[in-house]
Image: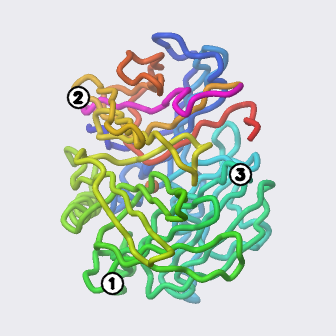
Amino acid sequence: MSYMAPVPDEIDAYDLPVSGALPPELTGRYVRNGPNPLPGERPGHWFNGHGMLHGIRLRDGRAEWYRNRWVRTGRLAGLPYARPDGGRDLTAVSANTHVIEHAGRVLALVENGLPYRISPDLGTDGPLDFGGRLTTAMTAHPKQDPATGELHFFGYGVRPPYLTYHRLDASGELVHSREVAVPGGTMMHDFAITEHHVVWLDLPVTFQPHLAGRTMPYQWDDGYGARLGVMRHDRPGAPVRWFDVEPCYVFHVGNAHEDASGRIVLDAVRYGRADFTAVWRMAGGSGDPAASASFEGSARLHRWILDPATGTVREQALDDRAVEFPTLDDDRVGRAARYLYTSDDSAIVKYDLVGGGAGSHRLEPGTYIGEAVFVPAVPGPRGEDDGWLLSITTRHDGSASRLLVLDASNLAAPPVAAVDLPRAVPAGFHGSWIPDVARRR
Ligand SMILES: [Fe+2]
């Protein structure tokens, strides 16, 4: 066993043991997605296991239930991704990367297919194509504008159109789609928004036709170059302004914003060539990632400042710690944010991007922690870090997991609460807090 080992089945557990005191304001569900192959199945690449949702339902200071469910995708039912006509079945995917709520709908996402709509008890309602309007895949990292409620996203593919930008209005209707010209098919896992712009990551991990038919046919490509693109999202047809940058790869954006000079400031977790290659080899190499002792390849928080007035870009490392899974207060997406939360696998690390420095909450030895989701304290005015961080921890030997609740404003303090889960939850990808009462924006 290891903390990456998949679980063999779906279970339900009720009235979970809680240490500390769960804030009664935390009434809703924390749901996290991740890859979980069926028993006996070897996905070939850790990123390729079927999506499994792990959910914990909190209400009025109690942990009412835990349950886990595979997302019932076409692929889980055995449908092939490649269709006989050469096209792709965008429902025959894993839906294993993220789970978000927008316009009252909960969606399980993976970047090579359609979103799957999820019910409150983690059942699968089915794929969603927004009335037939979405004809590309949908990224697992859409961005909701905190002021408008719009959901910005994109789809990428291995043949033209390589990249398509989409936007939902606040009611969840797909109201805008446009192709964005890029030289080729890259693995574009994430992107950024600001108040007026989309920021594209056109980076040198490209589709490799000779690997087609394998699970993740992408590799580092020294010949592709590396560019960031800035595009007004409020002007249909606006051109993309491209900026050449030092070659790198980015799975995850922390945030972006426009500064007082009109420059675009992008903070993201950056991999150099060697680190990307190492993490890619680890995830895809053995076919049995559960046997891996740990993640390999490390990435660091990095800043790019793009100046549309001069066409220049400045970039700098912000820290030398190896971190991943950046998150922030959702009310600051696309706006200047002071705090970013990340994981270094054994601690939650909180960056102060204004005051400088970082604080952390380190776990007991032998415990893994992934992404932490910020949940704002409600109601009323609050500071940016006035709220909680939720994350699932897993013992390295696969013996146990907990849902940890930390005070985001004081990571040095002991956890506010911890919920003992009925068994180990394998390390996964991304999740969301879905409150019972939607917050007003
Ligand atoms: Fe991701």
Residue at 38% x, 41% y: name it: 342
Residue bearing the label numbered 1: 224
Q: Nearer the viewer, residue 8 or 197?
A: 197
Q: Tag 2: Cα neighbours inside 10 Å, few (<14), some, or many (≥20)?
A: few
Inspect the magenta stretch and tell me whether residue 387 lies in it: yes
View quadrant of ligand 1: bottom left
Direction from residue 396 to residue 91 in the image, left or right: right
Residue at 46% x, 70% y: name it: 307
- x, y percent for residue 98: 53, 51
The numbered mark, 2 or 3, whose residue comes first in the sequence reads 3
Residue bearing the label numbered 2: 366
Q: Magenta residues, as a range?
A: 380-397
- x, y percent for residue 126: 69, 57
Q: Which type of secondary structure does the marked residue at label 3 adopt?
A: strand
Direction from residue 319 to residue 91 in the image, left or right: right
Inspect the magenta stretch and tell me whether residue 142 lies in it: no
Amino acid at pointer 2: Gly
Can I make out residue 291 in this image? no
> Can you tell which of label 1 and label 3 is closer to the viewer?
1
Amino acid at pointer 3: Asp
Residue bearing the label numbered 3: 125
Report, in whole angstroms, how far the alpha carbon at label 2 lies from the one at label 3: 38 Å
